[in-house]
Image (cartoon, rainbow, N blue to C red):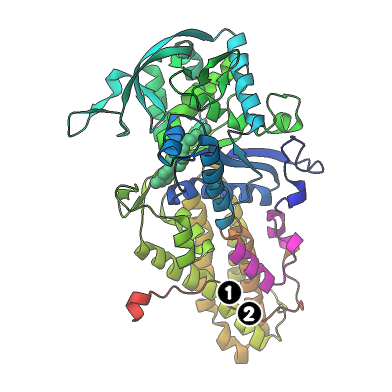
Amino acid sequence: MLASSDTKTNHTGTRKNDTLASRPYYLTTPIYYVNDRPHIGHAYTTLACDVLARFKRLDGFDVHFLTGTDEHGQKVEKSAKAAGVDPQAFTDEVSQNFRRLTEDMNYSNDDFIRTTEERHVRAAQAIWRAIEDNGHIYLDSYSGWYAVRDEAFYAESELEENADGQKIAPSGAEVEWVEEPSYFFDLSKWQQPLLDFYAANPNFIGPDTRRNEVVRFVEGGLKDLSISRTSFNWGIPVPDDPDHIMYVWLDALTNYLTAVGYPEKENPNYVEYWPADLHMVGKDIVRFHAVYWPAFLMAAGMAPPKRVYAHGWLLNRGEKMSKSLGNVVLPQDLVERYGLDPVRYYLLREVPFGNDGYISHETMVSRINGDLANDIGNLAQRSLSMIAKNCGGMVPRPGTFTADDKALLAAAAGALDSARSEFDRQAFHRGLEAIWRVVGDANRYVDAQAPWELRKSDPPRMATVLYTLLETIRRLAILIQPVMPFGAAAMLDQLAVPADARDFTHLAPNHALVAGVALPKPSPVFPRYVDEEVTE
Ligand code: MSP
């Protein structure tokens, strides 16, 4: 079950729930730049993590789920200037939009970190010192290209040209020439250790296409990395040299350590949760997480994370979302129009996770009316109304189960294994597909068994069929909780399943519904979406 608010991590780093001696699972979202309002692309990354965090909690893990905001650097400083506000006041305000998003989307994060917090400044300076003490930092000067939008340095050879003949980054971002004194990290020395690390940890980067890209990039040779800036000052001062501020990516990546109590390595959260189990990122920031970050950590004497997974981009009808194209989709607008659970389901079901994917009104409506209203909603509503009418509103008493009954119940129990193995490799769409295969089986079973015909001809068999359906629905409702927490809870309430009997251990047959238990009056859980334009 979800950690209740009184067992959540506090910022002094005490452990979330000392009574839980279960397996730790630490997962993180990227921390979001506070230069803009959160859009559906940001909501998507955190949603995937939220679903995984909920899944793992229900599966008995002691989950620590972190998200937050990336508040330093030139890009944020520029946005603050453009807004005519001082950067701290600016970040205080914009960060709230991301915090609010966690409520609007019903995310179950255990912590929300801001890189301007004192705990983080301490951690970032500590990792700098650790890397420096181990001899991996030297002072020199940087002259080269920098893209403020990406907060990234690019080699001349990586640059492309736009239609006007201007040099641009491979991401399309504008680049500027920078010359300034700078500290460097000896990244070039980490080529072989990184390649060895990737070879020894084949699951470190997912999906495979990204892994291959990263390995090729590292095999191509690594240059030492500039890790401080002197031409502006919105950042964390370099220890003992405040003319320099830390490169925003070194600062930002360290948030994953800050949140588990670093630099106190004896902090129970650090002991329990580091190395992180999963950093979820978008494909645009793989290099930072899969190359720089493990190198920084190894240089500082810490273990790299266990896995980095890079998902694709959400495209609005095939186009990248941007303010200039005016096609940015706001998560709150989608939720208001379609409802929160349907939006959560749609985003993870429609787009194969890892690929770029289109979102559109048409595909949203087709998922809502097909997968949700017709397939699972109607299944529950039909079964529950038949029980309300014909079984006195109580869980019916089953007789002997036939092979068909047993096959359906077994499929519903077996969906956990399939969903787990798919979710563990972040194939959320496949995990949901596996659950919906059982929904399909259950619908075919109702049609084949035709319980409405058994009402007169064979009432005991009708009771067995309705029981089998109800028990299948219970298992399905337990399984869909991570994706649609409200809808699943409503379904489980209608089956009178107590709140403490909803984790995955309760999928086992010994927790099956008990005949004779009174059920509340049924009401539809997943309504159809009716398009106003069409009905007018
Ligand atoms: N601040 C850095 C991350 C630092 S992590 C130590 C950053 N921030 S970001 O706000 O620009 O992007 C955060 C995440 O949102 C990235 O993973 C990015 O891929 C994701 N998305 C932004 N737009 C997106 C879409 N349109 N679709 C899917 N995800 C996209 O990078």
Which type of secondary structure does the marked residue at label 2 adopt?
loop
Numbered label attached to residue 380: 1
> Which of the pair 327/109 is nearer the observer?
327
Amino acid type, callout 1? Ala
Contact between marks 2 and 1 (CB within 8 A): the answer is yes
Give the vertical position of 157 relative to 60 (above or below): above
Q: Earlier in the sequence, mark 2 or mark 1?
A: 1
The C terminus: image quadrant: bottom left
Q: Is residue 222 above or below residue 61?
A: above
Task: Classify the position of the N terminus by image quarter.
Answer: bottom right
Q: 10 Å neighbourhood of mark 2: few (<14), some, or many (≥20)?
A: many
397 with respect to 132 (left or right)? right
Magenta highlight on residue 240: no
Query: Residues under labels 2 and 1: Cα distance?
Result: 9 Å
Residue at the right extreme, as displayed: 19
Say if the magenta span includes residue 508. yes
Q: How far across and how far down the image is residue 490, in percent?
A: 63, 69
Residue range highlighted in magenta: 486-509
Q: Residue at x 70, y 60 (%)?
A: 502
> Which residue shows up at 47% across the image and 29% down it?
73
Categorize mark 1 by other alpha carbons within 10 Å: few (<14), some (14-19), many (20+): many
Disc assigned to residue 52: none
User: Could you tell whether 158 is left or right of 304 in the image?
Assistant: left
- The answer to which of 168 and 363 lies nearer the viewer is 168
Q: Quadrant of ligand 1?
A: top left
Percent across and percent down for residue 410 are 62, 61
Give the residue pinned by disc 2: 522
Q: Main secondary structure of the magenta part?
A: helix
Mark nearer the viewer, 2 or 1: 2
Coordinates of residue 425 in the picture (x, y in percent): 52, 42
Question: Does mark 2's beta carbon lie closer than 8 Å to ligand 1?
Answer: no
Task: Give coordinates of residue 435: x percent, y percent.
Answer: 54, 59
